[in-house]
Image: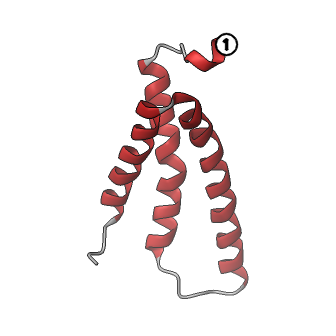
């Protein structure tokens, strides 16, 4: 299995979240709101645990977790802009 670099992982996440927006904007909007919060909490706990007892986790883990927080926010903001702030399920 080939190892992906951080930029490739970022692009895959953008595609993943973008496909959700194209398929179902209701689910995608919730995913783009909830996933970054959950991943940020995991990242923060990992960082604190690493400060308490250093582990052999490489920097790539922290970079990937950080872009995992940023990617859904960027995709959600992009599609919100594309739709002109007019998300269908919010009107119902």
Quarter assignment of residue 33: top right
Q: Residues within 10 Å of mark 1 (few under 14, many from 20)?
A: few
Q: In the image shown, does 18 or 26 lie closer to the viewer?
A: 26
Quarter holding the C terminus is top right
Which residue sits at x=41%, y=47%? Answer: 16
- The answer to whether residue 59 is above or below residue 77 is below
Protein image colouring: secondary structure
Q: Position of residue 39 (x, y in %)?
A: 62, 57
Which residue sits at x=46%, y=46%? Answer: 71
Total number of numbered labels? Answer: 1
Which residue sits at x=46%, y=39%? Answer: 20
* Helix, strand or loop for disc 1: loop
- The answer to whether residue 32 is above or below residue 87 is below
Q: In the image shown, does 48 or 83 lie closer to the viewer?
A: 83
- The answer to whether residue 80 is above or below residue 13 is above
- 18 to the left or right of 88: left
Residue picked out by circle 1: 92
- The answer to whether residue 64 is above or below residue 61 is above
- 57 to the left or right of 35: left
Q: In the image shown, does 41 or 53 lie closer to the viewer?
A: 41
Which residue sits at x=52%, y=67%? Answer: 62
Spot the residue most to the left: 2
Quarter assignment of residue 83: top left
Quarter assignment of residue 1: bottom left
Q: Position of residue 43 (x, y in %)?
A: 63, 64
Q: In the image shown, does 53 or 31 lie closer to the viewer?
A: 31
Q: Position of residue 28 (x, y in %)?
A: 54, 36
Q: Position of residue 69 (x, y in %)?
A: 55, 51
């Amino acid at each position: 299995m080939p190892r992906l670099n951080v930029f490739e992982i970022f692009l895959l996440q953008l595609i993943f979240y973008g496909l959700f927006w194209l398929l179902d904007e209701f689910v995608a909007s919730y995913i783009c709101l909830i996933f970054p919060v959950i991943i940020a909490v995991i990242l923060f706990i990992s960082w604190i645990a690493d400060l308490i007892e250093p582990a052999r986790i490489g920097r790539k883990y922290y970079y990937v977790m950080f872009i995992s927080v940023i990617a859904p926010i960027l995709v959600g903001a992009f599609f919100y802009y594309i739709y002109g702030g007019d998300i269908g399920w919010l009107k119902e």
